[in-house]
Image (cartoon, rainbow, N blue to C red):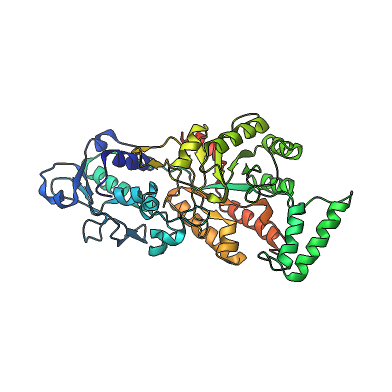
Amino acid sequence: MKRLSEKQIQYTLFHLSQHWKNEPSVVKSFVFVNQDEVDNQSYLGKVIFPLSDVQVPQTTTISILNTTVPVLFPVSKSADLYRIDGNGNLIFAHDFLKSAFYLLSGWQELQTGHRDFIGRYPHSQSIQNRLRCTKLPLVNYYFEAIVQGFEAYGMHHNKLIERRRLFNEFGFLLSHDVDRVEFYHYREIFFKLKQYFGLSKRYYSKALTLKLFFKGLLFKLNPFRKTDPWWNFDKMAEQEKRLGIRSTFYFLKQEHKNMDSRYQFSDTKIRNLIKRLINDGFEVGLHGTIHSAKHESSMMGQLREMTKALGHKPRGIRQHYLRFFHPYTFRLQIKAGLKYDTSLGFAEHEGYRNGYCYPFKPYDFERDEMLDIWEIPLTMMEVTALNYRELSYEELKQSVFDLIVEARKFGGIFSLLWHNCRLDEYQYPGITKFYNSLLESIVDVSPTCITGRKLVETIS
């Protein structure tokens, strides 16, 4: 990637406008120059953005908000963020625009081209992993540096620079992917035999695995059986209502035999559940099947069935397994009429895949244009913490609050995904109590609790 094109600059400035109220006289002063021409111009009272022509990131570190931050495309050796010269020009010390664009647009993912066996961009290949900064929203820091520069420029030229924040404190978006609804489904029951005999990965002890197999058979044979432990939606909803939370539930239909759900949107039980959630003020969205990330017929078919079950078209989607192909999956979502996606997070590490704790619009490199759909970044998924990273409950909680600290700095969003089937007391003893306590702790620090739909309505 050479220096940013005009369209790429405008794309980055579009997102910068979420952080300051564009003062027209300041915007008119913007000048974009090659990095080696910054000091060779006779500008007066301009805002000068140096543009790096380096192909790949060549990082240096600076301090922003008392935090050490890597700049991906430095253009000087200065530790300062900017300077005001004798002609009243504001000159930025580094190419903050390109550094922001590189992460925000997903350029690094196209540059490396790596995919895991499911088709996901792996955290291990990311620059955030290499620089050990996945939990820092770097784009927000770059925009902070720019806005600080604007404020210094405004003071020098007697111009009012007003900041913008999305939330007074931070936004909390809680969501649930409804992958499984029956712990005692026949497939789950007999799968435990495979686990017992070592034919599949075992999540419980050998004795407990056999016990759960027989318990499942008895459950199916008992006409007076209690509620299945994975059909826990009423308990989840009541806890959230008590705390003043309205979350988003993303429902997944059965399409692929082994990798999707084991229910259909047309099932009476599912339709009634969706109706109850909607009536209680929760959002219901689409959890795109494994095929929908690549196949238009799959995406459109699911949308029709979900619309019929909902009574209206869903606004948002998260792709199953976070499987995503940039920009093709976005194009399918847009064609389906969806207003936002919330799939872009690393499966194996919590944090900021695109370096930003605000909603943003993706960039289509093939067509060289901004796409008309919002991405709400996924910050933390419980599977990431408990399975991939094998964190303890306390470590998971600490990581959540590390991310909340970052979101709060910028008035951004903290997004937490927790599957209903992950409240499994057999696999994770004490998980329900911990989860409820975690929600209480988050609410105690005064977030604005919001659904994906309401967030997009707010910013659109």
- In the image, taking residue 313 as reference, residue 119 lies left or right, namely left
Q: Residue at x 34, y 40 (%)?
A: 11
Q: How many numbered circles does the render carry? A: 0
Q: Residue at x 63, y 46 (%)?
A: 256
Tell me where residue 155 appears, x and y as whole percent. Answer: 25, 44
Q: Residue at x 54, y 55 (%)?
A: 380
Tell me where residue 32 appears, x and y as whole percent. Answer: 21, 43
- In the image, taking residue 411 as reference, residue 233 lies left or right, namely right
- In the image, taking residue 90 as reference, residue 374 lies left or right, namely right
Q: Nearer the viewer, residue 326 or 155?
A: 326
Is residue 161 visible in the rendered image? The answer is no
Tell me where residue 440 appears, x and y as whole percent. Answer: 63, 54
- In the image, taking residue 150 as reference, residue 267 lies left or right, namely right
Is residue 209 visible in the rendered image? The answer is yes
Quadrant of res 63: bottom left
Tell me where residue 217 appears, x and y as whole percent. Answer: 83, 57
Q: Nearer the viewer, residue 233 or 317?
A: 317
Q: Nearer the viewer, residue 449 or 123?
A: 123
Q: Nearer the viewer, residue 443 or 112?
A: 112
Which residue is outermost to the right? 223
Q: With respect to residue 176, does 389 lie above or below?
A: below
Q: With respect to residue 30, does 258 lie above or below?
A: below
